[in-house]
Amino acid sequence: MTWTRITDPELVAARLPAWFASRMVGLRGSFGLLLTTGDVLRVTSIAAAHVSSDGTILLDVLLDLAGVPDGVDQAWRLKHYLGSPVPGATVATVNLAHIVAAVEFTVAEMAAQSGDPSVGYGDEIDDSPPPAAPEAVSQTTGS
């Protein structure tokens, strides 16, 4: 099996779900990766991807501090939060197949929605209707 390491944020993003691409690749923040074990891996960024010849994708991540993030909802407090095991150990590699969900822990305006549907989400989430499907156009040429 051969592996290709990709560090260009655009090329990494092309191999990940949209949310990963726009929020976590090459940027810094406070995120959690919910793993298949039920644990949450706290990360600040995705630095690179390793793609194998069989399609397996591993992600190089920068670890955040372990422990429950400030202000997290009560339902999430019961999770086990993994992070940097010792000071200075901030790099890890995780298999994308073991990630169930990704969440952002940074306090954001959209986290405090009033329940009023007329209040927008902000630039982070596009809640506008999807664009119209393009029409197929063909052109015939005379011979």
Image: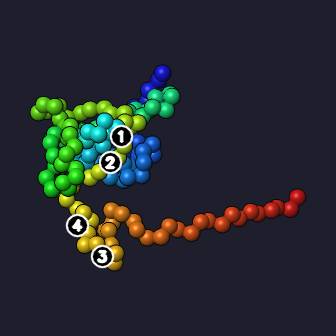
Q: Are marks 4 and 3 in contact (CB under 8 Å)?
A: no
Q: What separation in Å lies between label 2 and label 4 (alpha carbons)?
A: 19 Å
Residue type pointed to by label 2 = Ala
How many angstroms separate mark 2 from mark 3 (CA)? Answer: 25 Å
Asked if the residues shown at circle 3 and circle 1 are in contact, with their CB atoms under 8 angstroms apart, the answer is: no
Give the labeled residue for mark 4: 112
Residue at 47%, 23% in the rendered image = 2
Residue designated by label 3: 116
Determine crowd level at label 2: few under 14, some 14-19, many 20+ residues with C-alpha closer than 10 A: some
Where disc 1 sits, the SS reads strand
For the residues carrying marks 2 and 3, which lies nearer the camera in this image? 3
Q: Say which element carries label 2.
A: strand
- Residue 137 in which image quadrant: bottom right
Q: Please, what secondary structure does the residue beneath circle 4 have?
A: helix
Of mark 1 and mark 4, the one earlier in the sequence is 1
Q: Residues within 10 Å of mark 1 (few under 14, many from 20)?
A: some
Q: Nearer the viewer, residue 23 or 95?
A: 95
